[in-house]
Image: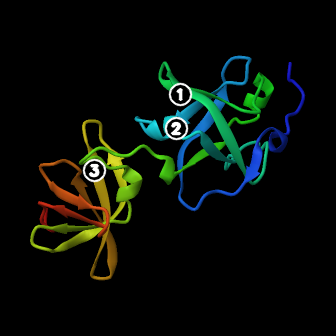
Amino acid sequence: MAGAPVNLALALDVSELPADAIEVGRIADAWGIKGWFKVLPHSASPEALFSSKRWFLLPTERGVKTFAGTLQMKVIEAKTHADTVVANAQGIDDRNAAEALKGARIFVSRASFPTAEKDEFYWVDLIGLDVINREGVALGQVRELLSTGPQAVLVMDYTEDGKVLERMIPFVSAHVDGVDLPTKKITVDWQPDY
């Protein structure tokens, strides 16, 4: 039996997406009867979800849209449960309200991410960096990172003979000499013909 329709714009704050917003997950479904909901994080280590007490929601790209624009959610608690994350938020007090969030995309401000340890980097900070080898040869610009299980792989675009091509380098200490975020460069032990 379906409950009464929920107006999420009344339950949550209408907001603007911060300039440094990063998409970190999606709301999968309601969890229990007290307004908790399941979150599918985009990362195997969802620390950004746990460290931020303000999540920004955008409606699902497909399917039923239960709200429009950007809503800001004040997170009361987020925690790991089995193989997912569950959370509850101010204004989401019952299962109907939690179900109305299904499919919403979750963004947090990059400034609210926990500080990375020495020699640890958030993938989002590596996107767009230039990759050069020890000899100073430009190898490309990071487009994305892939998780291959035991390691991450830098996926770069580079241009050769007017064509945009792809190059991949394992993001491991055996090949990566250093990451310099202020100069937006990654130095690697890699040759263009590998």
- x 38%, y 57%: residue: 125
Q: Which residue is mark 1?
A: 85
- The answer to whether mark 3 and mark 2 are in CB contact below 8 A is no
Up-down relation of residue 3 to residue 14 (above or below) = above
* Amino acid, disc 2: Leu
Q: Is residue 132 left or right of residue 126?
A: left
Measuring 22% from the left and 55% from the top, which residue is drawn there? 169
**Can you tell which of label 2 and label 1 is closer to the viewer?**
2
- Secondary structure beneath dot 2 equals helix
Q: Which residue is label 3 attached to?
A: 153
Comes first in the chain, label 3 or label 1: 1
- In the rendered view, would you say 35 is above or below 13? above
Residue type at mark 1: give it.
Val
Residue extending farthest bottom: 162
Q: CA separation, marks 3 and 2? A: 24 Å
Circle 2/circle 1 CB separation < 8 Å: yes
- Which of discs 3 and 1 lies nearer the camera? The answer is 1
Q: Percent from the top left, x then y, of residue 14?
A: 77, 50
Amino acid type of the residue that numbered disc 3 sits on in the rendered structure: Val
